[in-house]
Amino acid sequence: MKAVKPNIRGILILDGDNRQLPDDEVLAEGLTILRWRRYEAESYLVHPEALARFVGGTTPDLFTHAGLECLRKRLPPVVYEDPLADNDYLERTPASKTLLPGFLEAAGVSLTREEYYQVAAQMLPEEIPNEVRDKLDVICEALDVRENVTEEE
């Protein structure tokens, strides 16, 4: 890519499960490296209200309650009650392999990992952890997204 576009820039966001991997193993000129504090990006979808809204819409049903009960049993109470707070549990738990599939199965919803973005689409701004906003701000800054949008308008 650099041969074609020498000034190309990029962002690499690493999951939190590889904290021991030094950045210089993947470092390249023009590449900004970020790491999630939580185990993986899917860990930021663990928000009981957002998940309930995703499976039940505006009228939660028995399946919604079954999914939430599954989450309540698997999550430490502090995470269930305050999913936005920093917590060791979400830093070491692969939500995409444990929490989300169990919740979705209990709620009677068939969703592949590649379709988890649909959960994020249902989240309200106040349900999105600050770290996600911070990473998006870094992406915009590193790629000059805001400047390009302003120039085109």
Image (cartoon, rainbow, N blue to C red):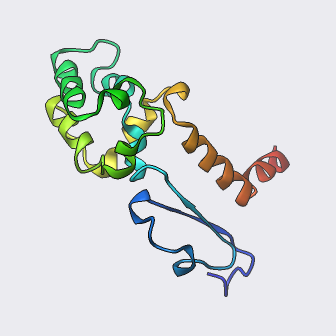
Pick the quarter of the image with the C terminus.
Answer: top right
Picture quarter containing residue 130? top right
Instruction: Please give the name of the residue rendered at 66% of the width and 83% of the height, measured from the top-left corner.
Output: 2
Picture quarter containing residue 30? bottom right
Question: Which x, y percent locates residue 27?
Answer: 59, 77
Residue 43 vs 69, above or below: the answer is below
Residue 141 vs 99, above or below: the answer is below
Instruction: Please give the name of the residue rendered at 56% of the width and 43% of the height, measured from the top-left corner.
Output: 131
Question: Which x, y percent locates residue 83?
Answer: 41, 31
Instruction: Please give the name of the residue rendered at 29% of the width and 49% of the height, measured from the top-left corner.
Output: 96
| Of residues 95 and 52, the one drawn nearer to the viewer in this rendering | 95
In the displayed orientation, state which residue is furthest to the right.
Answer: 151
Picture quarter containing residue 75? top left
Question: Which x, y percent locates residue 140?
Answer: 69, 52
Question: Which x, y percent locates residue 22?
Answer: 51, 74
* Count of all numbered marks drawn on residues in the image: 0
Residue 108 vs 94, above or below: the answer is above
Instruction: Please give the name of the residue rendered at 62% of the width and 79% of the height, measured from the top-left corner.
Output: 28
Residue 30 placement, left or right of 11: right
| Of residues 109 and 14, the one drawn nearer to the viewer in this rendering | 14
In the displayed orientation, state which residue is furthest to the bottom.
Answer: 3
Residue 11 placement, left or right of 7: left
Pick the quarter of the image with the N terminus.
Answer: bottom right
Residue 90 placement, left or right of 139: left
